[in-house]
Image (spheres, grey):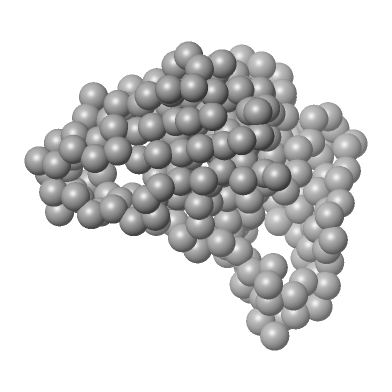
Amino acid sequence: EDQVTQSPEALRLQEGESSSLNCSYTVSGLRGLFWYRQDPGKGPEFLFTLYSAGEEKEKERLKATLTKKESFLHITAPKPEDSATYLCAVRSFNTNAGKSTFGDGTTLTVKP
Amino acid sequence: DTEVTQTPKHLVMGMTNKKSLKCEQHMGHRAMYWYKQKAKKPPELMFVYSYEKLSINESVPSRFSPECPNSSLLNLHLHALQPEDSALYLCASSQDPVDEQYFGPGTRLTVT
């Protein structure tokens, strides 16, 4: 059974204070790892897809990396508008196409 | 355009009512999803339609009935719901069932 664990559960940063969110996963054959951002009361917003160890993707202040056991979402010089819950999800080759396993998320708060 | 629309935004219904949630996308995506999300929890998969056919039903109670009239539309018919069914209902779509998902803003459902 696929498993995803995100840490920390909550993270409070000062504006400009860089940090990383962790997503540890256990799957039998990774088809893809996805990062989403979710604001309160809204639907998740797609950020990145990573497929293989060593892959990296960047978007503005965010950079996602992938190893064989975990993924990191690095946030450089965050701003208050980066405050949100960040969700990690995996899809494996051993589950029905279309089914993702989500982590519980990391809630990021950036103070001005 | 990566927009998925959902109507209504809010819905309050009694336990004997029948209502429907609607979802639409015009991205040419061939997979569409229904998720249920409770507060401070990740989205929980309910149904997946792949190429207009139901491919995944996550043992959802029969009081929830999905329908995919065409490749752009997805409905969720609700009947005889329970108060514990109150949640944010999210629709999502993806180009293919293995790809990243694009979520709608959700319908906030309250069952009284």
Q: Which residue is pictured at 86% across the width and 46% down the height? A: A57
Instruction: Say whether residue A33 is left or right of residue A57.
Output: left
Vertical placement of residue A29 versus A109, above or below: above
Say which quarter of the image contains residue A112. bottom right
Image-based side of B2 in relation to A57, left or right: left
Residue at 51% x, 57% y: name it. Answer: A42
Residue B90 position within the rendered picture, expressed as x and y whole percent measured from the top left: 45, 43
Closer to us: B73 or A102: B73
In which quadrant of the rendered view does residue B100 lie? Answer: top right
Is residue A99 visible in the rendered image? The answer is no
Can the viewer see residue B15? Answer: yes
Image quadrant where one finds the N terminus of chain A: top right
Q: Is residue B86 left or right of residue A64?
A: left
Q: Quadrant of residue A19?
A: bottom right
Q: Is residue A59 left or right of residue A30?
A: right
- Residue A102's place in the image compared with B38, above or below, is above
Rendered residue at 24%/40% (across/down): B19
Q: Position of residue B50 (x, y in %)?
A: 54, 18
Q: Is residue A21 above or below residue A12?
A: above
Quick check: B15 above or below A15?
above
Q: Residue at 81%, 48% (x, y): give it.
A: A64
Between residue B22 and residue A98, name the one nearer to us. Answer: B22
| Residue B77, position as x, y percentages in the image | 29, 32
Q: Position of residue A88 (x, y in %)?
A: 64, 44
